[in-house]
Image (cartoon, grey):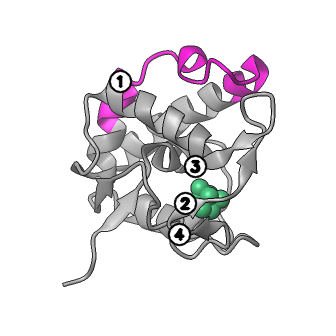
Amino acid sequence: MAKPLRIKPHHLLDIIRDLGAGKKHEPHPYGHGVHRLARIIRDNPHTVFVLTADADSICEPCCNMIDRRCVDTTTSPGRKVSKESWNRLIDGRIFERLGLEEGAAISALDFCRLASERLGDLYTLYVEADPEKTAVREKNLTRGFEEYLKAAE
Ligand code: SF4
């Protein structure tokens, strides 16, 4: 049997946000699997994913994944930090807000339904981030939820 697809909650939300922004996912120089999972999520909303805060099916082929940890950095919180730590912080908040545990199996569609109801205020979810960037995230994520849920009706 094929291994279940694993995804970090923030990766799933980022893909929905990108769909809301009308972004086309192309292969990335890092070699990660965002484009592959974005296509699956877009075309097969009933696909079940196992939620994880560890390396997921997007990270698997990425050049930044060493010993199953992300060695990249990010400036999302306004200073350069480990992307592994930042991702764990955000994913932990998402798990808490949605009332989900690591290892939960849920379809992309059900995850989006739940997130559209329970994710809440993005300015406190991304409290360390630039509020202007959060405003853009909020606009695109809201549109992404609307379009994704409507297409699956
Ligand atoms: S290993 Fe890091 S940079 Fe690569 S996909 Fe995963 S989180 Fe992103």
Q: What residue did someone put label 4 on?
A: 67
Q: What residue did someone put label 1 on?
A: 97
- First in sequence: mark 3 vs mark 1: 3
Q: Position of residue 36 (x, y in %)?
A: 52, 71
Question: What element does badge 4 sit on?
Answer: loop
Q: Is residue 69 above or below residue 76?
A: below
Q: Nearer the viewer, residue 83 or 9?
A: 83
* In this rendering, the label closer to the viewer, 1 or 4: 4
- First in sequence: mark 2 vs mark 3: 3
The majority secondary structure of the magenta stretch comes to helix
- CA–CA distance between discs 3 and 1? 22 Å
In the picture, measured across the screen, residue 114 lies left or right of residue 94, that is: left
Residue type, label 3: Leu
Residue 57's quadrant in the figure?
Answer: bottom left
Q: Which residues are magenta?
A: 113-136
- First in sequence: mark 4 vs mark 3: 3
- CA–CA distance between discs 2 and 1? 24 Å
Asked if disc 1 and disc 4 are in contact, CB closer than 8 Å, the reply is: no
Residue at x 42% of width, y 59% of height? 41
- CA–CA distance between discs 1 and 4? 29 Å
